[in-house]
Amino acid sequence: MKPLTAFALAAVIAVSACSGPTPLVTAEEVDDPASPQRAKVEPEVKLPSFPKEQTLIRYDVTPKTSLEYFVDSTSISLPGEGIVRFTVVAKTASAENVSYEGFRCITREHKIYARANRDGAWVMVKGAGWEPVSERTTPMFRRELYWNFFCPSKHTINTPREGVDALRFGRHPNARPEGSLAD
């Protein structure tokens, strides 16, 4: 191997200097739930049992659609990191869609972990990533769950029971004001 010429060595040093130092992550950043560093760590996904009719709780979506929406009360979990996971079911007279989803409340993000196939078995969504909960791009049934049931005021519910109670009551007591659509 040939030794580097003075010119080549100078070029390598210049490129290295331009890239700057590698930023260090402090313990505070990793422990802070709002830190982007913290958001990179997600608890393992454990798929729930397939929903049963008797454990579904219906919730309203405005404006009304031909679909009815339900959450499986036994699927609501709080695995940590400010995440709420749940099974949502959308039904028409002739069809049913079932998915296992999650919210990261503090960062206002959503993820679909798995969908049910026709046989009622879970199929993991490949390459699923966190997407923003947005007034423009997020379907209304998800926005309703985020704002009015599981992440009122961008705060994660404290227990699965709190989520079940909010669904049964028709909204969380700390949910945004009725009719408010502002992000």
Image (spheres, grey):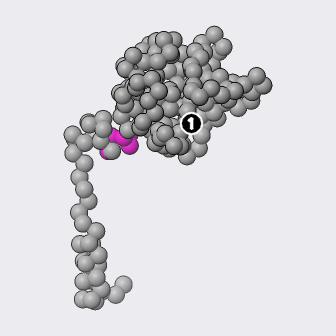
Crowding around mark 1 (Cα neighbors within 10 Å: few <14, some 14 to 19, many 20+) is few
Residue drawn at the location 46% of the way across and 18% of the way down: 171
Across and down, in percent, residue 38 comes to: 32, 40
Is residue 101 rendered to the left or right of residue 26? right
Q: Amino acid at mark 1?
A: Pro
Is residue 43 rendered to the left or right of residue 54? left
Quarter of the image with the C terminus is: top left
Instruction: Write down the residue under mark 1.
Output: 139
The answer to whether residue 148 is above or below residue 137 is above
Across and down, in percent, residue 68 comes to: 65, 22
Is residue 123 rendered to the left or right of residue 45? right
Quarter of the image with the N terminus is: bottom left
Q: Is residue 95 magenta?
A: no
Out of 54 and 140, give the one closest to the viewer.
140
Tell me, yes or no, if residue 160 can be seen here. Answer: no
* Direction front: furthest residue: 179
Residue drawn at the location 36% of the way across and 28% of the way down: 153
Across and down, in percent, residue 81 comes to: 36, 32
Across and down, in percent, residue 60 comes to: 57, 21
> Would you identify the image quadrant in which residue 155 lies?
top left
Magenta extent:
37-41
Residue drawn at the location 25% of the way across and 48% of the way down: 25
Residue drawn at the location 50% of the way across and 15% of the way down: 170
Main SS of the magenta segment?
helix
The answer to whether residue 6 is above or below residue 158 is below
